[in-house]
Image: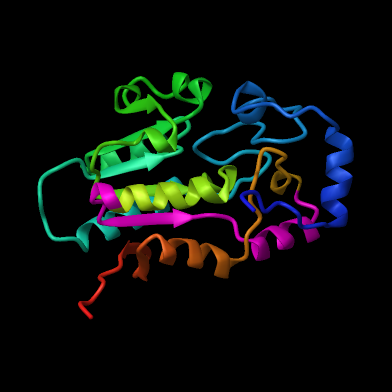
Amino acid sequence: MDDINLVDHPFKREMAGRVGGAVHGFDHAYFDDPDALTGFRGYREDGNTAEGRRDFRAEALDVVAALRALPARPGPDVLDVGCAKGFLVQHLRSLSVDAWGCDVSEYAIGRAAPDVRPFLQVARIDQVDATYRVIHICGVMIYLTVGEIRAALGRFRDLGCEAIVSYEPTLERLQEWWDARDEGAFDPLRKQELPAATWDGLFHAAGWERASGCWVPRVTLPS
């Protein structure tokens, strides 16, 4: 099964009834409509009304730590997959990191700050075809099928990526948010609601293993 979004929860049912059939894409309704029932309702660097959880400065420092743990070599440092308006890329570049970003949303990238816009592009995850030392991908793979997740993780490894810094909401975390009646946790665009062990299994099957704060390519020892 490619989509695993079958978990039932009373709050999910309530929100689905309120939203009805109105499911938008990654556009104004998703990012910046303050009256939307789903989405960010104002995607800003300092948080937003629906889910003020992201700390882009802290995420940037996590990426820098992963990058510094690697042997020095030339090449683009970081690609932020699902960069939206480029807040993380902006922070990384302020820290002298050669950071770039891509996102499927023309709307979000079109509203990036002028100083970071040249380093962003509209592209799907399967269109990444350059080698970046570190891939940052947070809250993006939940919008992919399992097959697409497997393909993306395998592709990053084949391209020679040296580390992935990833955060995807686990089923356990989502259930905490639903129990708390956190409306920001309801998203009809999301395709995956996976336990932490399943996420770990997907990374491991694609040739990655956990390191300090990131995933690194698993070394297969000769038999």
- Which residue occupies the extreme left position in the image? 73
**How far from the left and from the top, in percent, is residue 212?**
34, 70
Q: Is residue 215 above or below residue 221?
A: above
Residue appearing at x 82%, y 57% in the figure: 8
Can you see residue 68? yes
Q: Is residue 106 left or right of residue 159?
A: right
**How far from the left and from the top, in percent, is residue 85?**
46, 30
Q: Is residue 40 left or right of residue 81?
A: right
Viewer-nearest residue: 2 or 95: 2
Can you see residue 57? no
**How far from the left and from the top, in percent, is residue 217?**
29, 63
Q: Is residue 64 above or below residue 204?
A: above
Quadrant assignment, res 66: bottom left
Viewer-nearest residue: 56 or 160: 160
Which part of the image, by quadrant, shows the C terminus?
A: bottom left
Residue appearing at x 66%, y 61% in the figure: 171
Residue appearing at x 70%, y 42% in the figure: 187
Viewer-nearest residue: 166 or 6: 6
Quadrant assignment, res 143: top right
Q: Is residue 177 left or right of residue 59?
A: right
Q: Is residue 5 left or right of residue 22?
A: left
Viewer-nearest residue: 222 or 101: 222
Write the start and end of the magenta stretch as one range: 158-182
